[in-house]
Amino acid sequence: MFKKLLEKIKDKKYYLIITVILFIFLIFMNEPFEKSYYTYTSQNAENLVGQTDFLLAQSKVSQKFISERDDLVKIGIKTVTQDREINSKANIEIKEVETNETIYNQDISLLGAKNDSYFEIEIDRQKASKNKEYELIITSLDAEESNATMFALADNAEGTEETYKYNGVEIKENKLMLNAEYYSASSAVLHIALWILIFVLSIGFILFGLDGANEKTFLKLAIFVVILYIFITPFPHYFDEWSHFFRAFLISQGDFYDEINEAGEIGGQVPENFKAFLFKKTTLEHFSSNNLPEIDFFSENKSFDSLMYFSSTIPLGHMIPAIALFIGDILHLNSYVAIFLSRLLPYIFYVVCTYFAMKNLKHYKSLLFIVATLPIVLYLAGSVSLDPIINGSAFLFISICLKYYFEAEEDTYITKKDIALLIITAIFIITNKYLTYTPLVLLFFLIPKKKFKTTKSYIAMIVVSVIIGILCVLWQFYMLDAFPYEEDRNGNVSQEEQIEFVLSHPVLSSRILISYSIGQLKEHKLTYTPSPLGSFSDLTGIVLVIGAILEKNKFNKEKSSKILSIILMTIFIIALVLAVIALYLSFTQVGAETVQGYQVRYNVPILMLFLITIANCCKVKNETKNYERNVAFIMLLLNLDTMLAVLTEAFAKF
């Protein structure tokens, strides 16, 4: 066994060396373990009610506070600057009240003070600070009214001793708005342990999982990468996970459609503070510092709350994470366990669909591997989102159609299993993202008629597909009519007015839509990563194009290859333009000369159509040794870059 391990190390030594260098570089450049990441922050108030007078030269403001925890490392005071530059100086003193010991005393510039922000003072770590009383004293040294700051005030609860003093006069009605940060050793240990774990798993994957750009390697990489994403990605992530979760939660309660209350608001019955919880980020830092926000998804005390996003989408895609939440309710699971479970089911759906899609393909397998393991794709696969549902469905549907197109001359028939999968995946494709990807189902006609045992069965398949398609379209129009949604974040957004604008300005509108559609294919728009740490994942667009050019296993029948390219590119362009039009109508200001809200992840379900066309157009003979293994390694590196960025974010302050 040891001899075999040495052989593997020798065979993959360059991959191992590059991986070690990557980790060293990312640690050196980003300092992920610096102390500021391991802090728990508490505030003494949330709502500002006023501010002090200007702190002029020789004026003094002070307040006592009690430390909630051990390991106090930073004190912050909220400043009110009215957006002026504060270039004055002040003496800041912090002392322990009981012993009168000064733990901080320095003359500093207040230049960093910003309006409605905390001006922070870093102090030596106070290991035994819990329940101790401290006093913060700020004395202005040279400020005039033009460059002096004020300090934010909050209401002082009756009976508390958090009153502040201004020039020695106690003001009982208010208190200064302070925050305190505490070093969390458990956060530091967990963060470092996860870096070590990811490094060890990376080495293990290279030695035992890095075989080639195929379905087996995909499965190993997806298990390694996505399971970690499920746990380390802050909840909710910034790709609308909060709104997807809201919709899935309502479905899990049996509310297949949203509710409209008497005021015309769209939403549903949710637990107390549910929406407020979704609008905050919960991270590993909260977990490790024992500071998880309190929430009980399955409480019987519910009330109506409005959230119209995705109310007008057909609910089939959201049913998958909803199943997880339903199980959580039945088993009375902890709310955070339910979150992980609701992320796990879309991941399983995506991985299973993509595994069999890759297994189906005789040609362009490594190209699908690149698309399927893009950092943004695997990141979203482990989340409550429609993306893993539509991506997995699209990959599997495309692969089945291409499989029988490539086998046109072979004496085989389409199986009942593949027919069922075509129908199921087509339903998910049509019913997600407001019919945007419906043109993908036209790929069905790539399957030769002779692959069906009888003409009758071929016609029956078409009839059934058309009926299902029409029903899905009618369902979507019903949803749009029943739950009218107009975006409220981008100014004057109105679907009706935008349609009128398009019809009255056909040339201008066409120019806008065509220009923006082309713009989506430019290099700077092809960054398929959520948040790279070392910026290597910014190269994903280049990797896609080069991967298409260098694809080794192309479909080489010239006439059939040309026909395939024309069909694929036509469907790609139609779907891309439909996606742009959908956002122009529903998300963009009326009459705007750009399109708002388009994200490059929307290209993923149709990306294979574009890349196969490029591959067919480039007659490059690729004789690179271990090419497919190199492809898998590159995708590992890109995902490591992104994963470590997400991990760093998980311990950052919010």
Image (cartoon, helix red, strand yellow):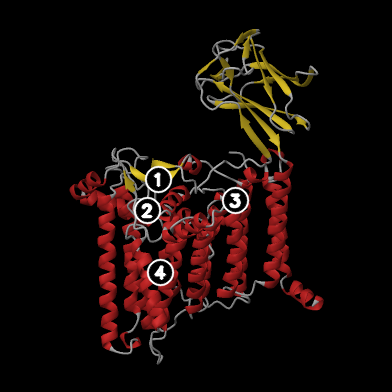
Marks 2 and 1, how far apart at CA: 9 Å
Disc 4: which residue: 609
Residue placed at 22% from the left, 49% from the top?
A: 499
Relative to 134, 583 lies left or right = left
| Labels 2 & 1 near each other (Cβ < 8 A) | yes
Disc 1: which residue: 269
Mark found first going from the N terminus, 2 or 1: 2
Q: Which mark is residue 255?
A: 2
Marks 3 and 4, how far apart at CA: 30 Å
* Amino acid at the residue labelled 3: Val
Mark found first going from the N terminus, 2 or 4: 2
What secondary structure is marked by label 1?
strand
| Labels 3 & 1 near each other (Cβ < 8 A) | no
What secondary structure is marked by label 2?
loop
Neighbour tally class for label 4: few under 14, some 14-19, many 20 plus, Cα within 10 Å: many
Quarter occupied by the N terminus? bottom right
Relative to 20, 501 lies left or right = left
Disc 3: which residue: 646
Mark found first going from the N terminus, 3 or 1: 1
The mark lying in front, picked from 2 and 3, is: 2
* Amino acid at the residue labelled 4: Leu
Mark found first going from the N terminus, 4 or 1: 1
Residue sitting nearer the eye, 32 or 519: 32
Residue 326 seen in this snapshot: yes
Marks 2 and 4, how far apart at CA: 37 Å
Relative to 634, 425 lies left or right = left
Residue 546 seen in this snapshot: no
* Amino acid at the residue labelled 1: Gln
